[in-house]
Amino acid sequence: MDLDFTWLGNLALKPEPRERTHLEPQNPLQGPEMGSQTGVGEYTDTTQAENAAEGLLEPLRGMSVLKEREEARKAAHERSMEIYREYQANIRASELKQAEILKGIRAGADPYDLLLTAVEAIAGMTHNELFLRQAREDLIAIQGEALREPAPLAWEIETVEHRLEHLRGALAQEEDEEGRRRLAAAVRAHEERIAGLRGRLNGSIHTSAH
């Protein structure tokens, strides 16, 4: 009887089992959870890396927030200090106006001048320039133009003279012929206005003297 030794040859051709490494998934059809495949049978876990990057960014975000809060706090403090400095300046200006009023009363100053000084003090304390401008215009129109009171008339003369000075300066610099003609007409109108106001002022002074 012949013996069959072919199984020895098959045994020699069979590869030995390869030792499994920790990089190989036990199931070749399913890789590590939340991982990404980098090669055949090889995976890298990215979740841990993302968490580490996030952990590094978190302190930076916190520092940015703290910096913004500190800058906002400094800006608010500076605004508060500016308001306080302005308030103190207004108080000093008001005190000077009060002293000026008392001095004018003792010196027998014109009541309209004292009234306007008081209006200036109030406008400065309340930041209300419109109040000052309106009060002055009304005093000129009613007490000056209508009632011929000397002080309001003098205020109006001062205002018109101030505008006349600017018109003369503009006329000296104007090169266009038409522009010069219009400015010259405005200058003449202001000069006539001043002359008329001075006539009223002199008449009111004479009337008051009598």
Image: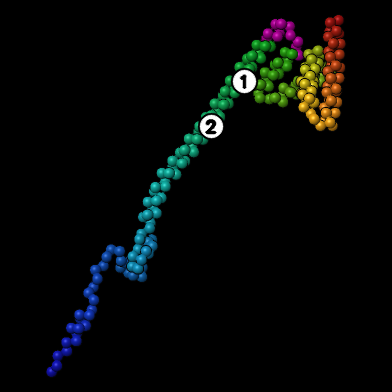
What is the x, y in percent for residue 52?
A: 37, 51
Could you tell me residue 107's position as x and y percent? 71, 6
Residue 138 visible in the snapshot: no
The label on residue 113 is none
The residue drawn where x is 77% and y is 21% is: 165
Q: Secondary structure at mark 1?
A: helix
- Residue extent of the magenta highlight: 102-112
Q: Is residue 6 above or below residue 168?
A: below
Quadrant of residue 126 within the rendered picture: top right
Bin the neighbour count of mark 1 within 10 Å (Cα to Cα): few under 14, some 14-19, many 20 and up.
some
Which residue is label 1 attached to?
Answer: 90
- Image quarter in which the N terminus is found: bottom left
Identity of the amino acid at label 2? Ala
Q: Residue furthest bottom?
A: 1
Q: Looking at the figure, which quarter contains the C terminus?
A: top right
Number of labelled discs? Answer: 2
Residue 109 magenta-highlighted:
yes
* Image spot of residue 53 (x, y percent): 39, 51
Is residue 3 rendered to the left or right of residue 201?
left
Question: Please, is residue 57 above or below residue 152 in the view?
Answer: below
Q: What residue sits right under mark 2 in the picture? A: 76
The x, y position of residue 183, in whole percent, is 82, 27
